[in-house]
Image: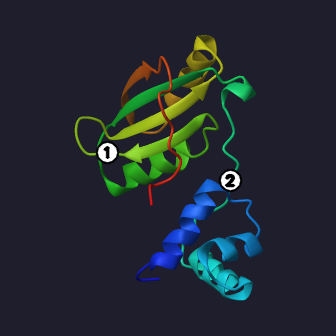
Amino acid sequence: MSELDAIDHAILKALQSNARITNADLAAKVGLSASACSRRLDILDRSGVILGYHAHVSPKALDYKMIAIVHISLSGQFAKTLSEFETAVKRCPNVLVCYLMSGEYDYILRVAARDLEDYERIHRDWLSALPHVVKINSSFALREVMDRPNVGL
């Protein structure tokens, strides 16, 4: 899909607000028939514009009270090194986000932990065991100011 038009943007905005909206309600909201809306939605799904439909679950409700921002430096940035690190980090269940970075650190992770003792376990058993890691720098979030799950439309 090369370009998104105003109707596509309206569909995406409505879904970001409520992904559980019925197709009939979505169609009415964006000014399409139900079948036309369904076709548009299918195109947005198949083309990768829509990456999925998710429940935004509170980490605190699951007893994860701590978020760590973790900066990782690797021994090098060879394709094999990056690939091995990325394959391994995806297996760590507490890593919520992983970004390959430019600048001082190679990766930045957002890690959920129940408490400091749990983070120590994650650091020892997972983060320190990741391949090619030479430096780990952890900072702890004091308070979440905002967590915007969607891009503004």
Q: Secondary structure at mark 1?
A: loop
Q: Can you say whether 43 is above or below 15 in the image?
A: below
Residue placed most toward the observer, 86 or 113: 113
The residue that label 2 is drawn on is 54
What numbered label is drawn on residue 38?
Answer: none
The residue that label 1 is drawn on is 101
Work out whether residue 89 can be spotted: yes
Work out whether residue 126 can be spotted: no
Residue at figure coordinates x 23%, y 35% from the top left: 104
Q: Secondary structure at mark 2?
A: loop
Residue at figure coordinates x 39%, y 50% from the top left: 82
Measuring from the top left, give residue 36's x and y in whole percent. Answer: 66, 87
Distance between the alpha carbons at the discs numbered 1 and 2: 26 Å
Residue at figure coordinates x 69%, y 86% from the top left: 33
- Left or right, residue 123 beside residue 38: left
Q: Nearer the viewer, mark 1 or mark 2?
A: 2
Residue placed most toward the observer, 25 or 104: 25
Residue placed most toward the observer, 93 or 84: 93
Which amino acid type corresponds to the residue marked 1 in the rendered image? Met
Which amino acid type corresponds to the residue marked 2 in the rendered image? His
Measuring from the top left, give residue 61's x and y in whole percent. Answer: 73, 27
* Residue count near mark 2 (Cα–Cα under 10 Å), binned few <14, some 14–19, many ≥20: few
- Left or right, residue 124 beside residue 72: right
Image quarter where the C terminus lies is: bottom left
Measuring from the top left, give residue 15's x and y in whole percent. Answer: 62, 62
